[in-house]
Amino acid sequence: MRHLLSIDDLDREAIERILDRAKTFTDVSEREIKKVPALRGRRVLNLFYEASTRTRSSFELAAKSLSADVINFAASGSAVDKGESLKDTVQTLSAYRPDLIVIRTPFVGAAQLVANWTTAGVVNAGDGKHEHPTQALLDVYTLRERLGTLEDKNIWIVGDITHSRVARSCILAFQKMGAKVTVAGPPTLIPRGMEAMCEVAYDLDRLPEADVVYALRMQHERMTDSFVPSLREYAAVYQIDGRRLGARQVLMHPGPVNRGVELSAEVIDSPQAVIGQQVEAGVVVRMAVLYELLTGRSAPKPALTTAVPA
Amino acid sequence: MPEPKVVLDEDDIRRTLVRIAHEVVEKNNGRPVALVGIHRRGAHLATRLHQLVEDLLDEQVPLGDIDIAFYRDDLSTRGPDPHVNDSNLDFRLEDYTVVLVDDVLYTGRTVRAAIEALFDYGRPQRVQLAVLADRGHRELPLRPDYVGKNLPTARSERVNVRVREVDGVDDVIITELEEAFA
């Protein structure tokens, strides 16, 4: 495997292999020297066209824990502000001979394009509202830690499905692991044709059936039209609060949380919430992804000249 | 394919480990020792050796195990190990002479990786090496402190240590590799 662009690049066996390895990496942060030399001398380029706290920092920490070198490239404050295109930027940065490019952009399919332009491996760290595969992997990891298995579990993903790359990747990943997925939210925030992928609900009446409640962030920054009358009204119908969340249910959220919108303050700090564990899992799971992509014969070898397929 | 040749059987292995245990105790002469097995079979041998050393010393001896998967020097060509074990080192390395235990000593690369891994956990007072079989063909300047059996071999041969815990049987066998694998 050279790239991780979509959860569809992985079958269940590959997901389990990566997550089992992630588990062995937990040991690394508990030692006196918190790194192993597995990726010594490899270069990882973080290319972020969108704001990100945990994804970028956890990729950086993951790479450093494996002794890889990290170059961070944030699009604001760079030549991108001066009008450089994505392709030109990638080709310019390829001169630094990265072994792997971690890319986040607001554009659907950008990671796939970049994979065509470079000899490096590419990890999609979020491309618009399309996919965010490492988030889905760390969510599966967190659930395996909490529940043992996802087989036959009922997972409800609640909120803004349309704008959520997390939802798309998570639906695919949870289903591959044997879970039954239901998405719930206002009709305006659920894409047409969703029924072909999983169960759809427009209210939370059947929420008590869920073993896992996965709340999504209301993404004001991607909403160009009015999808909901107001955030208050959304919260009244879809907010997960102490009344709606059962004692045996597991609560997840990809962060950052809009307190008082998709989640009430009480549930964020409840014992059902594994939001902190999700962040923690981010580092070991991303270590396992980097390790998977950068070791072995299939790992990208930097070419002597920067090849540019048409 | 020719029949595998058994060079050590169950009894031989037991006697050999008893001898190595005596040597470990004698060589360290009262200094605190700890045993650390290299996954997988080295870890099982270390567990047995540990029992013998504790019996001889009549005191508690720390036992650990270590996985070297992330320290190998051929990750870029061989690819990731399908299975990685947890490492367990729950004692202060600084206080002990650590005896690394492995099944077969060959090129020495595994031992190099194990030493590097060990030092990421702490700074042992000294490191010694115990192996059940030394088959030669070193590629690094390393030598074992305790050897179960020296086995002069050709590179085209393969030395397999089998242990009850993993393989259901205790023995050391030599097989001739097919030319294609040699």
Image (cartoon, coloured by chain):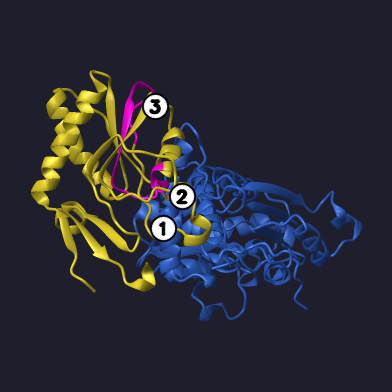
Quickly name the residue at label 3: B124
Q: Which chain is blue?
A: A
Residue A39 horizontal/vertical position (percent): 56, 50
Question: Who is closer to the viewer here, B149 or A28?
Answer: B149
Pointer 3 local density, CA inside 10 Å: few below 14, some 14–19, many at least 20: some
Name the amino acid type tagged 1. Answer: Asp
Q: Are marks 1 and 3 in contact (CB under 8 Å)?
A: no
Residue drawn 77% across the image and 72% down it: A308
Mark 2 vs mark 3, CA separation in Å: 21 Å
Q: How many marks?
A: 3
Residue drawn 46% across the image and 43% down it: A270
Residue drawn 56% across the image and 58% down it: A294
Give the magenta range. Answer: B89-111
Mark 1 vs mark 2, CA separation in Å: 10 Å
Name the amino acid type tagged 3. Answer: Pro
**Residue depth check, mark 1 versus mark 2: number of the one nearer the observer:** 2
Q: Which label belongs to residue A109?
A: none
Quickly name the residue at label 2: B72
Q: Does B51 sit above or below residue A79?
A: above
Most extreme residue toward the left is B11
Q: Secondary structure at mark 2?
A: loop
- Please state the chain letter of the residue tagged with numbered disc 2 in the rendered image: B
Residue A215 visible within the image:
no
Give left or right: position of A81 versus A267. right
Residue A70 horizontal/vertical position (percent): 67, 47
Q: Are marks 1 and 2 in contact (CB under 8 Å)?
A: yes
Question: Who is closer to the viewer here, A169 or B151?
Answer: B151
Quickly name the residue at label 1: B81
